[in-house]
Image (cartoon, rainbow, N blue to C red):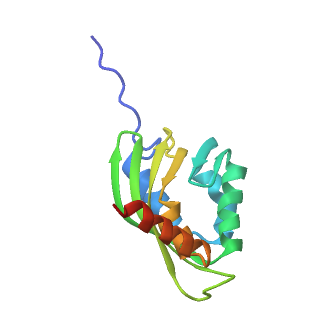
Amino acid sequence: MPTPASPNPAAAPSTEEAVTRVIAFFEALSPADIARMDSFYAVNARFKDPFNNVQGVPAIQHIFGHMFVALQQPRFVVTGRVVQGQQCFLTWDFLFAFKSFGKGVTQTVHGASHLVLDDAGRITLHRDYWDAAEELYEKLPVVGGLMRWLKRRANSH
């Protein structure tokens, strides 16, 4: 019986290589990079986080573009990764400052992303997990006080 032809390893990046490339992209992300997100996302990629659920590169570009408009110096620091098959799970810190209050005070959101990649190493699914109440709402004036009060009430016996 003939042996099947082995795939050409140069034809597509390994998942590990693709994930390394994605991490480097997100850790260096700037407003100028938004235009080239189609190099990292498949045409019909889906993105979901606590505030968004969109499909397609233009919608994903809009979310990341808005991040730079709404926040000061937003950046991601990937703190861990697990790669298995065509998917990975990344843990990260998102650092930023609010533009409207607490100017210049660095805020940190701890989160994780589940990414599924296609054979070309582009993201087809990007799902972010983070606690909007603890990581964001508690840092806002007025709302933060209410969220901390609700948390204390929920934790009291």
User: Residue extending furthest top?
Assistant: 1
Q: Is residue 31 above or below residue 20?
A: below
Q: Which residue: 43% across, 54% down?
A: 19
* Residue farthest front in this picture: 157
Camera-side residue of 100 and 13: 100
Quadrant holding the C terminus: bottom left
Q: Is residue 126 left or right of residue 93?
A: right
Rendering coords of residue 4 (x, y %) = 34, 21
Is any part of residue 127 visible from this angle? yes
Q: Is residue 100 left or right of residue 88?
A: right
Image quadrant where residue 96 sits: bottom right
Residue in the picture at 69% in, 65% down: 65
Asked whether 51 or 43 is in front, the reply is: 51
Residue 90: x and y in percent read 40, 56
Identify whether 99 is placed above or below 124.
below
| Residue 104 against residue 124 in the figure, above or below | below
* Identity of the residue furthest to the bottom in this view: 104
- Give percent across and percent down for residue 36: 65, 59
Say which residue appears at 43% left-offset and 44% top-offset.
Answer: 10
